[in-house]
Amino acid sequence: MRVGIWIALIVLAAGITGGAATGWMLVRASFPLTGTPEPDKKVSPFAQAPLLQLMAGKKTDDAHKGATKKGLDASLNALAMQYALAVQNRDCEEVIRLTQWMNERLTQVKSESGDLAVYEAAKEALYKRITEWDIEENQLSQEGLDDSYIFAPGATFEIIGQDTVPQEDYEQPVGGRTWLRVTYPGKQRAPRDGNGQPINCMQVGVVVSTNGKILKAGIKGNIQINYNSVSTQWEPSEGG
C-alpha cells in the first residue's frame, strides 16, 4: 500500500461509510473525439498568475484564502483523495472509471465505430497517458501540469481546505473544490518549476460536481494549481 493511503482512511472514518467509496465515478462532460479535452472551467484563476510568480519558488504553505477546514464535506474530500491515489498508483482501470471524460471518450468510440480493435486502441492510448513519464513534461507551466506528474509515486497528500467555485464557469453542477497539499519525497523525480528547480510541495485544487465527478479544471490536466504555493525550498535532510 503506497504512502498517502492512511490519509484516505482518516477521511473515510470522518464521515464516509465503509461501502460508500465503492463505485464512485469521477469527472467531466464535453470533449473532442481526438486531442486533449478542453477544461470545463473557462480559465483557472491561478492560470493567470504572472510567470514571475510561477518561477519564484517561494515557500507559501498557507492554504488558499478561500479554503476552510470548518464544515468540510467529507464526501468531496474522499472523492478528491480517491482520484489522487488512483493516479498515483497508475491504476489505469480505476483512473478511467473515475474520470468522466475518459469514460465518455470510450463510449463515443464504441458507439461510432463498433470495432473492438478501435475501442481497444483508444483505451490503450488512455493507458499510455496515465502511465508514461517524460522528463520534458515534468515541468510546471502556465498551462499547468498533467495529473500523473502532480500525483507522482511517493508523494504524500494532505487535505488542507475546501471552498466553492463559480457555477457559471462549469458545465456540471459544482459541489465544491478540495485543496490538497502535495509534498514530494525527493528532488530526483519531483516536478520542476519554471526555472527547472525541483518542487518540494504545492497546493492543488480538485473540483467535484454535485454528482460526485471530478470536473476538468486545468488545461493540461484535471487539476488546478495554486502557483503562489509552489515551494522549491528543501530541508537539508530532504531531496536526495
Image (cartoon, rainbow, N blue to C red):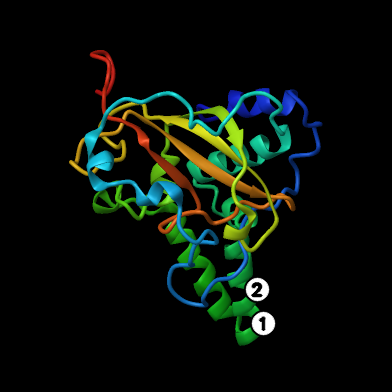
Residue 235 image offset from top left, x and y in percent: 27, 15
- Which quadrant does the C terminus fall into? top left
Disc 2 residue type (three-letter)? Thr
Q: Read off the residue under disc 1.
A: 111
Pointers 1 and 2 in contact (C-beta within 8 Å): yes
Residue 35 position in % (x across, y down):
43, 73
Q: Compared with residue 108, is residue 88 higher up or lower down, i.e. above or below?
A: above
Q: Amino acid at mark 1?
A: Ser
Q: Estimate how packed mark 1 is, as few (under 14), some (14 to 19) or many (20 or more) residues with alpha carbons within 10 Å.
A: few
Name the side, left or right, on which 196 lies relative to 32.
left
Q: Secondary structure at mark 2?
A: helix
Circle 1 — which element?
helix
Residue 229 in picture, x, y percent from top left: 37, 32
x 30%, y 27%: residue: 186
Observer able to see residue 192: no
Toward the left, the furthest residue is: 195
Q: Which residue is under mark 2?
A: 107
Work out how far the residue at label 1 is from the one at label 2, CA to CA, in angstroms: 6 Å
Q: Quadrant of the N terminus?
A: top right
Q: Is residue 109 visible?
A: yes
Task: Please give the count of numbered marks on the rendered protein.
Answer: 2
Q: Residue at x 25, y 49 (%)?
A: 135
Quarter of the image where one finds residue 169: bottom right
